[in-house]
Amino acid sequence: MAVQRTLAIVKPDAVSRNLTGEILRRIEAAGLRICALKLMHLTRSQAEKFYEVHRERPFFHSLCAYMSSGPIAVAVLEGEQAIGHWRDLMGATDPLKAAPGTIRKDLGVDVERNAVHGSDSPETAAIEIPFFFGRVELHSPVAQ
């Protein structure tokens, strides 16, 4: 099995509903390690740059407005098959279609306000992680 890193974002609605700690608890309980973590507030321009891949999609403008509407918690997660593991823990994009016990099913409001974001592939993670974190900010926790 390959150790991977992936990006995780606790979205503005989840931060405002005080769910950051619960989401981080679930991440750690699932065996993923947090290598970097910060709270920040994206500008509209930063949100547009991050979601550039969706520029031509009909939801692009509302997504960027939403993601710049309040603070987000951004983390880098590390572990065996971390990308797939995090995506399984998040659940389907639409909370109504997400499996019971997933973050989006339990904590999401709708397709846009679905509590969390995660990289969908190693290639995407390689772009998303450096968007938020420099190399000096990434740590590999020491197992105890």
Image (spheres, helix red, strand yellow):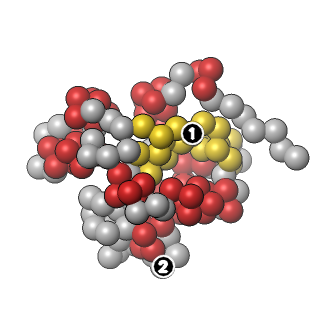
Q: On screen, 127 above or below 15?
A: above
- Report x, y in % for residue 95: 35, 71
Q: Residue at x 64, y 44 (%)?
A: 34
Residue 5, above or below 87: above
For mark 1, does the 10 Å Cα neighbourhood hold few (<14), some (14 to 19), or many (20 or more) residues? some
The residue mark sitting in front, 1 or 2, is 1
Residue 91 position within the rendered picture, expressed as x and y whole percent measured from the top left: 45, 65
Locate residue 135 relative to residue 73 in the image: left or right.
Answer: right
SS state under label 1: strand
Direction from residue 89 to residue 61 in the image, left or right: left
Residue 8 rendering spot, x and y as whole percentages: 49, 46
**Where's residue 133, x and y in %?**
51, 27
Q: SS for tag 2?
A: loop
Q: Which residue is mark 1?
A: 37
Q: Is residue 57 visible?
A: no
User: Disc 2 marks which amino acid?
Assistant: Pro
